[in-house]
Amino acid sequence: MIVERLAAIRTQIDAAARAANRDPADIGLVAVSKTVPAERVAEVWAAGQRDFGENYAQELRDKSAALDPGIRWHFIGRFQKNKARYLAHAHRVHALESLDQADALAERARVPVLVAVNLAGEATKGGVTPGALGRLLDGLASRAPVRGLMCIPPPAEDPEASAPFFAELRELAASHRARGHDDLSELSMGMSHDFQVAIREGATWVRVGTAIFGSR
């Protein structure tokens, strides 16, 4: 069943990309495997999925030790500085939000990062405000290889409600590239319910968990 759901998501990604006149190869699928048992992750790996996302640093550490070393692990949650040691081998850290976090990572490895932006100003979510993004990017220049931006829109039943936030993230990346941050080429946005909208608005990474693994 998991393999069939994975195939369906890939088909939907391909269709959404083509509808937006984009190359499907430019869009990476992160299978969000938080709290999913390692054996189910292995099943999806065997079906050809290579990128997996975890929200908890210790869980990433444990699964990366137990599963195929070829898996590309993405850390997509908020993390405390003292957990940075568990992320040294991550393929991407998607939710960096401070210079302190970058320094903690840099002590162990040069892990490519995406900066989390809190577009709606939600108190329950991390990320920098759009107004503070430039200062953070400037400070990160000597600390970490920044690859792009990440966001999580406010929850909404209608996937189209996410579109303005995805468009804003895309425009923020473009404006900061114009300021000299040339490496902001990646946009991590879109989850199980709205990834097709995110692709239309320029996502290069979509983070899909429930639609692949089912409800936790």
Image (cartoon, rainbow, N blue to C red):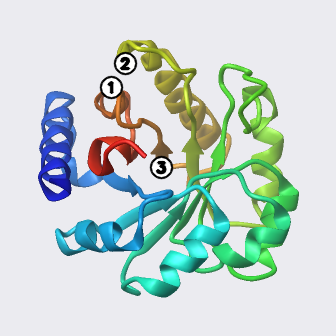
Q: Given the image, on which type of amino acid does mark 2 rest? A: Pro
Q: Which mark is on residue 159? A: 2
Residue sitting at x 16%, y 38%? 12
Separation of residues labelled 2 and 3 (CA atoms): 21 Å
Return the residue at label 3. 186
Q: Earlier in the sequence, mark 2 or mark 3?
A: 2
Task: From this view, report whether residue 77 is shown above or below residue 198.
Answer: below
Return the residue at label 1. 197
Residues at discs 1 and 2 in contact (Cβ within 8 Å): yes
Residue sitting at x 50%, y 31%? 170
Task: From this view, report whether residue 70 is shown above or below residue 36.
Answer: below
Q: Is residue 209 left or right of residue 128?
A: left
- Of tags 1 and 3, which is closer to the observer? 1
Separation of residues labelled 1 and 3 (CA atoms): 16 Å
Residue 98 locus on image (x, y percent): 82, 51
Say which element carries label 1: helix
- Of tags 2 and 3, which is closer to the observer? 2
- Of tags 1 and 2, which is closer to the observer? 2
Q: Given the image, on which type of amino acid does mark 1 rest? A: Val
Q: Given the image, on which type of amino acid does mark 3 rest? A: Glu
Residue nearest the observer in this picture, 95 or 158: 158
Say which element carries label 3: strand
Give the quarter of the image for residue 151: top right
Separation of residues labelled 1 and 2 (CA atoms): 7 Å
Give the quarter of the image for residue 86: bottom right
